[in-house]
Image (cartoon, rainbow, N blue to C red):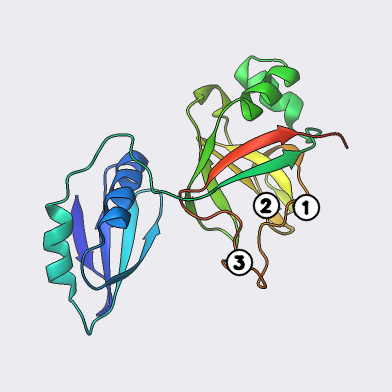
Amino acid sequence: MRCLPCGEAGLLVELDDLEQVLAMHAALQEVPPPGVVDLVPAARTLLLQLDPALTDPGAVAEVVCSTTLQPGAAPAADSVEIGVVYDGADLAEVAEHTGMGPREVVQAHTGQEWRVAFCGFSPGFGYLVAQDDRLHVPRRSTPRTRVPAGAVGLAGEFGGIYPRESPGGWQLIGRTDATLWDVERDPPALLVPGTRVRFVEVEA
């Protein structure tokens, strides 16, 4: 673990892997150090945003370095259910990569709980992780210039849903009409770090 000041109002905690990030996020969410106003996880780091009137990066770093991590811990958040039509352009290719049939891919995707590890790429895009590593597949060798909003995909160890049309290289297995980002909603993102997600197959 390494703690690096990030300006006057931030502390960047570098960790060994995503599991440690989730465990640190969970621990600091449960008992936030004084003066910490927000926690922003990523794949290997956790950014702590501070109120400089209440604390400083050095004081918070001492608390972070003394924090005991619980393996398998994850930040608490709500759960959501997302309906998916499994007719993605890459479903057959994902099946080939995994050695499963297309129906088995769907069953594996819907048959487990996913959790949002962190957010990024575009507003509302959550990087989801789950236990079944059979769905770990490589990104496409040639990214698409346009992926439609609502596309449900897989890439590496992550699952995700495109909140809006954009370029992308994920393997697409389905689509949803769930609204991932809505500025009129509080919070605007449907998926925030820690959110538990269940995918449910629906008819087109």
Of the pair 191 and 158, the residue shown nearer to us: 191
Q: Are marks 3 and 2 in contact (CB under 8 Å)?
A: no
Q: Nearer the viewer, mark 3 or mark 1?
A: 3
Residue type at mark 2: give it: Tyr
Q: Nearer the viewer, mark 3 or mark 2?
A: 3
Query: Is 196 placed above or below 123 here?
Result: above
Query: Secondary structure beneath disc 3?
Result: loop
Q: Quadrant of residue 149?
A: bottom right
Q: Residue at x 17, y 76 (%)?
A: 56
**Which residue is labeled 2 in the image?**
162
Is 134 placed left or right of 90 in the picture? Answer: left
Q: Report, in whole angstroms, how far the alpha carbon at label 2 lies from the one at label 1.
A: 7 Å
Who comes first in sequence, dot 3 or dot 2? 2
Q: Report, in whole angstroms, how far the alpha carbon at label 3 lies from the one at label 1.
A: 20 Å
Q: Position of residue 45 (x, y in %)?
A: 33, 54
Q: Residue furthest bottom?
A: 53
Is 48 placed left or right of 3 in the picture? Answer: right
Residue type at mark 3: give it: Pro
Of the pair 90 and 179, the residue shown nearer to us: 179
Q: Are marks 2 and 1 in contact (CB under 8 Å)?
A: yes
Query: Is 73 placed above or below 178 here?
Result: above
Who comes first in sequence, dot 2 or dot 1? 1
**Which residue is labeled 3 in the image?**
188
Q: Residue at x 27, y 43 (%)?
A: 16
Q: Which mark is residue 148?
A: 1
Q: Position of residue 6 (x, y in %)?
A: 27, 72
